[in-house]
Image: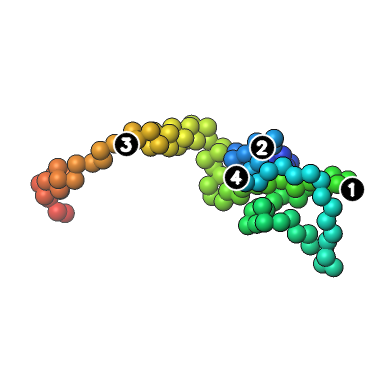
Amino acid sequence: MRLGGYKQGLPTFPLAHTPDSPDTPGMSKRATQTKNTDSKGRLTLGEAFANRTIIVEERGDDIVLHLARVIPERESWLYDNPTALGAVRRGLKQARQGKLSDGPNLANAAKLADKLEDN
């Protein structure tokens, strides 16, 4: 399976960006830059990449960086279940459009609870 263009047998998760567009507002495509690693092999990418998750892919002598979002394993089931994912997306769309339910009638529920016998 693929994760943001990275292949490692992981589930597929949608990313908020397309490969041809900037991932973060204000982050524009940049020309190739030359940077040096420090004595511990660290490389500074700059503020545009601050607090981001990045997948490092080695392709022979090249290193390719992929911006990524990590989804906890316990939540990954949603992306493996098209029916559930569709329901969640539909619900989010309805909420954005203001199509909200009135919710339960708590007064009627309280009346019903008063009529029930305690065991």
Q: Earlier in the sequence, mark 2 or mark 3?
A: 2
Residue 66 pos. (x, y %): 71, 45
Q: Earlier in the sequence, mark 1 or mark 2?
A: 2
Q: Nearer the viewer, residue 105 or 66?
A: 66
Secondary-structure class at tag 4: loop
Residue found 69% across the figure and 37% down from its top: 19
Secondary-structure class at tag 1: loop
| Residue 25, label in figure | 4
Determine whether, in the image, residue 79 is placed left or right of residue 35: left
Residue found 60% across the figure and 45% down from its top: 25
Q: Amino acid at mark 3?
A: Leu
Q: Circle 3 is placed at which residue position?
A: 100
Q: Circle 1 is placed at which residue position?
A: 61
Q: Circle 2 is placed at which residue position?
A: 21
Distance from Cα at disc 1 to Cα at disc 4: 31 Å
Q: Earlier in the sequence, mark 1 or mark 4?
A: 4
Q: Amino acid at mark 2?
A: Ser
Q: Which quarter of the image is occupied by the N terminus?
A: top right
Q: Amino acid at mark 1?
A: Asp
Determine whether, in the image, residue 97 is placed left or right of residue 10: left
Q: Residues within 10 Å of mark 4 (few under 14, many from 20)?
A: few
Determine whether, in the image, residue 29 is placed left or right of residue 91: right
Secondary-structure class at tag 3: loop
Residue 50 pos. (x, y %): 65, 57
Asked if marks 4 and 2 touch (Cβ < 8 Å), the reply is no
Camera-near label (1 vs 2) is 2
Camera-near label (1 vs 4) is 4
Q: Nearer the viewer, residue 61 or 47?
A: 47
Distance from Cα at disc 1 to Cα at disc 3: 54 Å
Determine whether, in the image, residue 37 is placed left or right of residue 18: right
